[in-house]
Image (spheres, grey):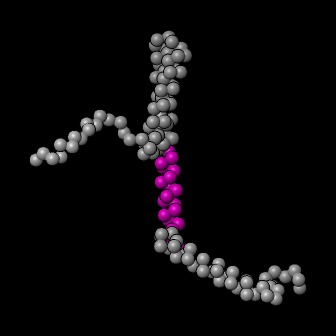
Amino acid sequence: MPGEAGKTGPGNGDRQSAADQDLERRRRKLEASLAAKGHGEGGGEGKARQSSVTGYGQALKLSSEFIAGVAVGAGLGWLVDKLAGTSPWGLIVLLLLGFGAGVLNVMRSAGMVADAGIRVPKRPEDGDRN
């Protein structure tokens, strides 16, 4: 019948088998590379699950550091406004500073910014002395 799937016409058998062989060769190559990376059938699922749990933990840590910076800035700003009677300027200024501190904390935790600190530059002649 002309509408049956899987049947090939005359002359298509050679092209079909060559394509099948090429796909089979590529599948084997992919399986071998995945097995070499440790993502094969034996234990790949456990590593993926552990990776996703680690990712959730990192996301929770980063978001809590950001929220803490903003909350502390807002709290201090509200307190300054209550004590000094400068409403709403203390809240606005310290909220913005808290936002900046939260972003900086997130970037430090993510490893995008080095920790701040006083570093004495190393002089070349220090290494030569005994």
Instruction: Give residue 112's position: percent from left, percent from top.
Output: 44, 44
Up-down relation of residue 106 to residue 29 (above or below): above
User: Would residue 130 appear left or right of 121 to someone viewing this image?
Assistant: left
Up-down relation of residue 82 to residue 59 (above or below): above
Q: Residue at the spot x=24%, y=41% of the render?
A: 122
Instruction: Give residue 66's position: percent from left, percent from top.
Output: 49, 36
Q: Residue at the spot x=42%, y=41% of the render?
A: 113
Q: Quadrant of residue 110?
A: top left
Q: Quadrant of residue 115?
A: top left
Instruction: Evaluate whether residue 69 shows in this view.
Output: no
Instruction: Evaluate whether residue 46 shows in this view.
Output: yes
Q: Quadrant of residue 18?
A: bottom right
Q: Residue at the spot x=32%, y=35% of the render?
A: 117
User: Would residue 118 appear left or right of 108 to someone viewing this image?
Assistant: left
The mark total stands at 0
Residue 44 falls within the magenta-colored stretch: yes
Residue 41 or 33: which is nearer the viewer?
33
Residue 58 falls within the magenta-colored stretch: yes
- Residue extending furthest right? 1
- Residue extending furthest top? 85
The quarter of the picture where the N terminus appears is bottom right
Up-down relation of residue 47 to residue 78 (above or below): below
Write the start and end of the magenta stretch as one range.
41-60
Q: Residue at the spot x=28%, y=37% of the render?
A: 119
Q: Of helix, strand and loop, which mostly describes the magenta segment?
A: helix
Instruction: Give residue 6's position: percent from left, percent from top.
Output: 79, 82
Up-down relation of residue 78 to residue 9 (above or below): above
Instruction: Give residue 4's position: percent from left, percent from top.
Output: 84, 82
Residue 16 or 75: which is nearer the viewer?
16
